[in-house]
Image (cartoon, helix red, strand yellow):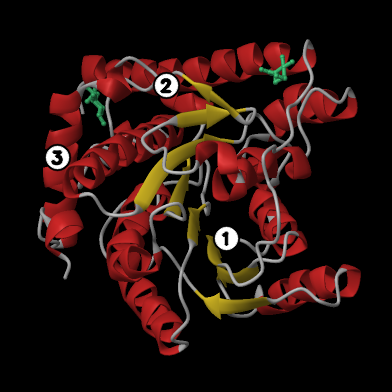
Amino acid sequence: MGFLKRLACYAYILCSIFKVYVLAAAYLLKQYTSKIRKPTGIEGSNRGKVAIVTGGGSGIGYHISKQLAKHGVQVIIGLIAASPKLSESEEAIRKIKHEMPEAKVEFLHLDLSSLESIRNFVDAFLQKKCPLHILINNAGLMFPPYTKTVDGFELQLQVNYLGHVLLTSLLWEKLKTTGQLHSYSRVINVASSVHYVSDMPADLDNLNQEQQNFSAHAAYMHSKLAVVMATYYLQRQLNRDGHYITVNVADPGVVSSGLFKYVSGFVKCFLVRPAAALGILWTMEDGAYTSVHLALSSEVEGQGGRYFFNCTNAKSSHLSQNVYLQEELWHKTCDVLHLDVNWPSTCT
Ligand SMILES: *[C@@H]1O[C@H](CO)[C@@H](O)[C@H](O)[C@H]1NC(C)=O
Ligand SMILES: *[C@@H]1O[C@H](CO)[C@@H](O)[C@H](O)[C@H]1NC(C)=O
């Protein structure tokens, strides 16, 4: 690579890092100066409802699962149930059952970094022959080093975005048959405030992008912007076809969670730990509230295509609302996943 090109790459990578941390700092300030809103409008019993929570064995997902179980929902947690993580998963479920002996919680193996694993997960779920009222696409990775999945996609792109699109498409029929007027099935896509600083949704033209030009920060924010845009696209299809499903985005806020695993020691030392100690970072329990609100609150019944932060409807980035880009993203997404672009409508 020429000197100038390399310089441009470094600038791109540094600029991405800078954007992410400035955004995080702004959010921290906002969170610091105000209180968190808890889920509201959750009335009556939710017994009999079934939810899938991806990545529900740890971090925010664990707390989403726990809070749903507390409201009587039967929760199926999709998580990597292979050693060495298996015991961690079993421990997570044991903890929920210990606190709530009535809780109906179980896990099924789901590795979003493998499209085959996603298909197997759905097969295993469908064999249970139970309805599906709530799908929470929560699992996510932040800033891992450059890695390609077995399917040839960058790891964050597949786990945060592509894998969840495939999962949703495979469960669509189930969601459709479960949803009823006044009791819509609900899909909640967990995104992140970092989508605000992304200038393009998932880079699907550059799947084989050079590793030298890889910015884990950029890949993360682009994958989250893609999640937001695909949510809006899907909801528009639903509005047109009249199925009883809603799709919304949950922004958990800047939360102290396992997502910081890959963050550099410097940032952990000077930003993450002090912020956690001062109580500026929301806890993982706090981070679960918006998803739980979208999953169960009567206030959002029948409402889709919205971005929620702090259990409140908020505005996502200007770019995310670009209908033309949403369609382009959708076509490319279905193309790389070998899905029919009309799957939301044509699933019978
Ligand atoms: C690096 O990749 C991004 C997209 O992934 C692109 O926008 C940017 O121009 C690239 N930079 C260089 C120097 O190749
Ligand atoms: C969250 O919502 C509460 C109640 O509406 C509000 O007072 C608070 O300012 C909000 N916090 C943030 C960080 O937006």
Query: Label 3 to label 2, Cα distance in Å?
Result: 24 Å
Q: Is mark 2 within 8 Å of ligand 2?
A: no
**Is residue 294 or residue 210 the one in the foreground?**
294
| Mark 3 or mark 1: whose residue is earlier in sequence | 1
Quadrant location, the C terminus: bottom left
Rendered image: mark on residue 316: 2
Residue picked out by circle 1: 55
Nearest-to-viewer mark from 3 and 2: 2
Q: Is residue 200 above or below residue 44?
A: above
Residue picked out by circle 3: 205
Q: Residues within 10 Å of mark 2 (few under 14, many from 20)?
A: many
Q: Is mark 3 within 8 Å of ligand 1?
A: no
| Mark 3 or mark 2: whose residue is earlier in sequence | 3
Residue 148 visible to the viewer: no
**Is residue 25 or residue 14 the one in the foreground?**
25
Q: Residues within 10 Å of mark 1 (few under 14, many from 20)?
A: many
Circle 1 sits in a helix, a strand or a loop, which is it? Answer: loop
Report whether 50 appears left or right of 91. left
**Residue 236 placed where, x, y %?**
23, 38
Circle 2 sits in a helix, a strand or a loop, which is it? Answer: loop
**Residue 264 placed where, x, y %?**
64, 34
Report whether 34 appears left or right of 50. right
Q: Residue at x 73, y 78 (%)?
A: 90
Report whether 224 appears left or right of 88. left
Q: Is mark 1 within 8 Å of ligand 2?
A: no
